[in-house]
Every structure is written in structure tokens, then in C-alpha cells.
Image: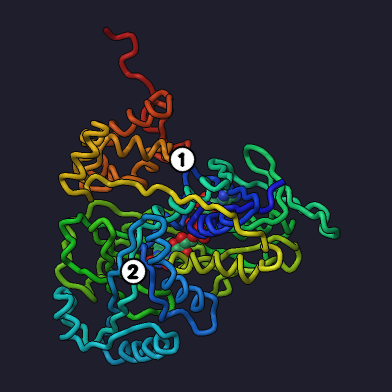
Amino acid sequence: MYDIIIIGAGITGSFIAHDLSKKKCSVLVIDRDADVGNGATMANSAIVHAGYDPKPGTLKAKLNVRGNRMYPDICRELGVTYKNCSAFVVATDSEESEVLDRLAGQAADRNIEYKDLDGNAARDLEPNLSGAVIRALEFPTTGIIYPWNVAIALMEEAVINGTELRLNEEVTDIDCVSQSNSDAFYRVKTTAGSYEGRYVINAAGVYADKVYSMALKKESDFKITPRRGEYYVLDEMAKPVVSRVIYPVPGPNGKGVLVVPTIHNNVLLGPNSLPIEDKEANCNTSEALSYVKSAVSKTVENIPFDKVIRVFAGLRPSGDAGDFVIKESDELKGFVNVACIESPGLASAPAISEYVINEVMKEAFSFADKEEYIRRKPIVYMNELGDEAKNEMIKQNPAYGDIVCRCCQVSRGEIEDAINRPVGATTVKGVKKRVGPGLGRCQGGFCEPLVVDILAKELGKDKAEIRYDSPKSVILMEETKKGAL
Ligand SMILES: Cc1cc2nc3c(=O)[nH]c(=O)nc-3n(C[C@H](O)[C@H](O)[C@H](O)COP(=O)(O)OP(=O)(O)OC[C@H]3O[C@@H](n4cnc5c(N)ncnc54)[C@H](O)[C@@H]3O)c2cc1C
């Protein structure tokens, strides 16, 4: 019997698992995917928004502002990168300028730092800003992160401190056993087994309504209709195009189409926002990508569209209420929904966890703090070290001098470490998420077969068993020259 079962190992479930691992309680995390952070957490703009735009009085507004203030310290403690890159929200006509007045008012009410610039002053700071921009609000506390790195780091630390993690297991049914007495608990059935827990936290992203329905035995009272967002990724050679996040004014569909510098010196262009019923349809379409191209061209000029190295899409877990749904079920005591976590869910995630533990479940989760808490050992990235430190690493282990990914300069030693860490990588995508081979210009064209070799060796598997990501993503079918001399 676990104290708490968390369904979903995205940024939300990972933050909650991490924070609960500081307390004396037993926690199980279940995710249907092959790795931590493979849902919405994998495919987004990676921005820790400052918090000026959510509607006043919403959970989104409260938790975004708080989350933005919590991130820098949390990332420092976890040993993951947080870059305080700043942002412009730009207006191109008087109507849009009125929207900036409203945002400035909300920022002032929420004590969010901002500067009001005319078009020319903004262009002095961002020379590629469109000539059509007449005014910009700068929000200096805007940051960028590498979202799945944060989720993985949180889960690593949770696991080091006793949390159990079960990947590749889909929750298929949930029974509430005897609600009426103090021994009430939940039986959570998965594709691989059955687990019992006194409390359930439903952090299942786009599937949170389905997961709640499993326990309720009827339709959930919130419905999630995913909104798909599509992106272009530009090669790092495009980096000088902007140094801040560039937002248009927000509209009915959210924050609009952005130009975003990333932690790895790439540039993201996107996303659009399209409601769709299919919770699996995170594919790209030429219509959406054309729309992204024309939308970003309204705010930024000289975008090198010939430097596109990848496109991708993500699904926002958007609810029908327009706000996050974070509460204990009215009908099922001890069942906590952390649902409809669309944008700014990433920016809000540390504050969502704090809110669940310290407010929503304050009485129930009053577990004592552990006397000792073990911090994770941060990942060492060779391409961030100076020559002397690199040489020292190579002297200790020559595998750090054996470069596997030439675009991003990732060594065999780093890949072996990524596989052998707590919550280690078991797939090609898992290695890419942790240490970066395949993130660069050739997108794994050169290094992917080498990564497959290293995974097979370290995991003691046959190469044909190694997957790109899900069990269905086969890379090698079988030996082609069986029996050949
Ligand atoms: C296009 C786009 C852009 C965005 N940009 C930003 C941004 O810049 N800043 C920001 O703050 N927010 C942004 N967001 C929102 C942010 O990405 C999400 O709010 C956040 O990632 C949600 O995290 P989560 O953990 O709640 O959900 P997810 O990351 O989706 O995790 C849910 C997990 O539940 C698992 N799961 C589902 N069903 C089951 C089941 N039956 N059994 C077991 N496991 C299950 C899934 O496998 C998944 O891993 C964006 C989102 C999108 C799609």
C-alpha cells in the first residue's frame, strides 16, 4: 500500500513527486510512456513566462507568477540550466497598443517588472524586430529552460530519495475501495499490474479527463480537448535573429505565434493553436506550418527559413473551464485532479506542486520532513568545459574523448553516463533528451547508429531490441546478412 500514487510523469507529476520525496511518505509514479516528460512537457515553447497575461483571479495567474519566481533557485539546486533571457510583447497598431496597456496594468498589479519601449528603442535592443512594431513591453523576468531536462532531474532526485517509478505502464482502470471508512484506498490497474494507494494524484495531461472517469465510473466533469501547436526549429547558426522571446499581443487563442531563443542556441518559431479531438494527433501539417511562417514574419524580419532543421508538434491539455483544474474530487475523497494544465503549465509547475501539497491537500499530506535529503549529481556536459577540465575528464575516462555526436560534440562517456544514471535513458530519444546527441544540424543522421550500439552494450540487449522511443518505434528490424562470411 503506497501513501500516494501519481499518474503521469510530465513536469506536473515530476514536480509533485520530487517535492513529496522530501517527506516521510511512500510514493509511486506511473507513466504509460517510455520516459519521463514525453507528453506536453516534451513539445512546447520552453518559456517560463513572467505571468502578466493570465486572466485576473485565475489559478493560472496566481501560479504562473509564483512559478516564475521559484524557477531560478530550483534549477540551480537541481543543476539544470535556467536562462533569464527576457521578452518583448510587441504591438503593430493602436488596437494592439491598447492590449499592451492592459498587460502593463496586470503586470503592475502582480508586481511583475516591465519596461515600456517605443518601436525604435525596442529595435535598438532587437535589431531584427519588424519595422511595423510601434511599441513593446519588455518583461525581463521571462526565462527559458529545457523542460524535459528539468522533469528528468526532478524525477532522478525523487527516485534517489525513495520514490518508485514505473514507466511503460498505462493506467487502465481505478477502483475506489470503501469510501465510507478511514481505511479507504484506491486500486490502480495498469497494463502490467495493480497497485494500491491511499491517495491518487491525476497528472495525466491530455488524458486526465479519461483517468478521472476511470475512478468516477462516469463522465468526468471536465473535458480536455487538446489544442495542437506546431513549430519550426532553426539551426544554431540562426541564433542572432533574436536574443529575447518575441510575443505578439495575446488573443483569444492564447499567446500567439512566437520567436523563441532556446537553451541550446537554436531558435523556435511557433506555435499555432488548433483544437482537435484526437489525443494522439501530435503531427505536423503544411497548413499550420505556413501559418506559423506568415505569423512570425509580422513581428520579426530576416528570419533564415533556410536554416530549419526540424518541425514538431505538441498537444496542450486544454480544459473547457479555461483555467487549471487543481482540486480534490468532490465525489472521491483522496483523489486529486491536477488537470487541464495547458500553458502556462510549465512556468507554473513548481507552484502547482506547492499548491497541491500545502493548500489543496494540506491536512492529508502533513507527512513529516525527512531528516536527510540526497541531491542528484548534475550531468557534466563536455562541450561546456574548458580545455583543462576536459583533459582532466578524459584522463579519468578516455570515453569522454571519444566524440559520438559531431554536431553537438557529445562523447561516448556522456552517453554511457546518461544510460547508467538513476532514471537512466533506455531509448535513443532518452539519450538525446539527457545529453543531446541528435539535437544538432544532422538530427542524428551520423550518430544515431552509434547511440544504438552504446545503448545495446550498456543495457545488455540486442541492437534490434533498441527503440527510438515507444515500443513501436523500431530502428533495426533484423540482421540483413545472416550467415554471410
Ligand atoms: C505547443 C505548446 C506550447 C507550450 N508552451 C508553453 C510555454 O512556453 N510555457 C509554459 O509554461 N507552458 C507551455 N505549454 C504548456 C505545458 O507544456 C504544459 O502545461 C505542461 O507540459 C503540462 O505538463 P503535465 O505534466 O501536466 O502533462 P504531460 O507532460 O502531458 O504529462 C502527462 C503524462 O501522463 C501520462 N499519462 C497519460 N495517460 C496515462 C495513463 N492512462 N497511464 C499512465 N500515464 C498516463 C503521459 O504519458 C504523460 O507523460 C505549452 C504546451 C504546448 C502543447
Residue 217 on image: x %, y %: 74, 56
Respond yes or no on whether mark 2 lies under 8 Å from ligand 1.
Answer: no
Q: Residue 234 bears which disc, if any?
A: none
Which residue in the structure is indicated by mark 1? Answer: 470
Secondary structure under the numbered disc 2 in the rendered image: strand
Q: Earlier in the sequence, mark 2 or mark 1?
A: 2
Q: What is the image's colouring? A: rainbow
Q: Residues within 10 Å of mark 1 (few under 14, many from 20)?
A: some
Q: Is residue 228 visible?
A: no
Q: Residue at x 21, y 39 (%)?
A: 392
Q: Give the camera-side residue of 94 and 367.
A: 367
Q: Residue at x 50, y 84 (%)?
A: 56
Q: Quadrant of residue 481?
A: top left
Q: CA distance from mark 2 to mark 1?
A: 31 Å
Secondary structure under the numbered disc 1 in the rendered image: loop
Q: Residue at x 64, y 43 (%)?
A: 190
Q: Is residue 256 visible?
A: yes
Q: Give the camera-side residue of 285 and 428.
A: 428
Q: Give the camera-side residue of 118 and 418.
A: 418
Across the whole image, how many numbered discs are drawn on residues? 2
Residue 384 on image: x %, y %: 23, 50
| Badge 2 amino acid | Gly
Q: Residue 143 bears which disc, if any?
A: 2
| Badge 1 amino acid | Ser
